[in-house]
Image (cartoon, rainbow, N blue to C red):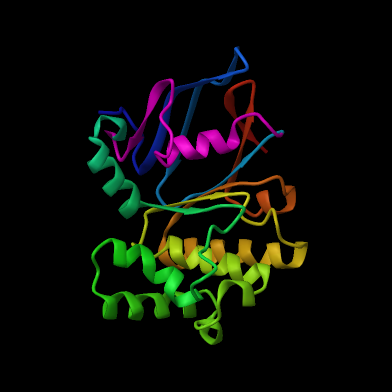
Amino acid sequence: MSSREPNTLIEARDLYKTFFTDGHKVEVLKGLNFSVKKGETVAVVGASGVGKSTLLHIMGTLERPTQGTIFYQGRDVFLLSSEELAHFRNRKIGFVFQFHHLLPEFNALENVMIPMLIGNIRERDARLKAQEILCKVGLKDRLRHRIGELSGGEQQRVAVARSLVFKPEVLLADEPTGNLDRQTGDQIHELLLKINEEDGVTLIVVTHNWELAHKMGRRVRLMDGKAWPEN
């Protein structure tokens, strides 16, 4: 168990991550410690290549650290079996990436339904839930539009909706506005903050946009393989 502070939801403990590229050893994370309380909004900033996305992937259990671990409400998640870890990830963590990873052959409603159908939720229930979430993110009139018929901002709203289908406790967003113009990016960021405020979802966002970062509750800078508080 972790000796965590009260209300700590997720904690990165003594993380190391090493890659080998063309025979060269690259240490990205070097004993990084980082914790987030339930309901917080946190921006992760730093230069390109310092490991921001790597950290987010490890916190979301998409990657394993070379050393160290992730505690979720005091439990070491990397002690779970592969099946248990996959279930934990699907039910507790939502992901939004710079590229939406939506399926172009399906419409907005179907894209949001798919994770629920894979999770053995009845089609009728999945459809109703998907409609509810898409309306919440402002796409009431775009349910039947295929992905290619939507604007970049609308596509990212579908991706946000898809990330919310299992009511995650934490939402991890990796440059969610990176492919959008400034105005559309601001709208997506405001949507994420609205979800945090209304639903209490903990929000961790990797971003290069300093203006957006300053709208978050706090900022953490990755530098020299560690996480540093940023004013």
Would residue 200 appear left or right of 193 to someone viewing this image?
A: left
For image coordinates 47% across by 68% down, the residue present is: 161
| Residue found at the very far front of the displayed protein | 105
Q: Position of residue 167 (x, y in %)?
A: 35, 62
Would residue 85 appear left or right of 139 to someone viewing this image?
A: left
| Residue found at the very far right of the displayed protein | 182
Does 59 lie within the magenta span? yes
| Residue 144 vertical position relative to residue 130 in the rendered view, above or below | below
On-image quarter of the N terminus: top left
Compare residues 19 and 65 and report the one nearer the observer.
19
Compare residues 155 and 10 and report the one nearer the observer.
155
Does 54 lie within the magenta span? yes
Q: Where is residue 135 in the image (x, y as percent from the top left)?
A: 48, 80
* Quadrant position of residue 14: top left
Q: Position of residue 31 (x, y in %)?
A: 49, 18
Would residue 65 appear left or right of 173 to someone viewing this image?
A: left
Total residue callouts: 0
For image coordinates 57% across by 72% down, the residue present is: 147
| Residue 64 vertical position relative to residue 36 in the rendered view, above or below | above
| Residue 93 vertical position relative to residue 22 in the rendered view, above or below | below
Compare residues 208 and 155 and report the one nearer the observer.
155
Q: Where is residue 128 in the image (x, y as percent from the top left)?
A: 34, 81
* Quadrant position of residue 72: top left
On-image quarter of the C terminus: top right
**Which segment is the magenta one?**
48-76
For image coordinates 57% across by 24% down, the residue present is: 226
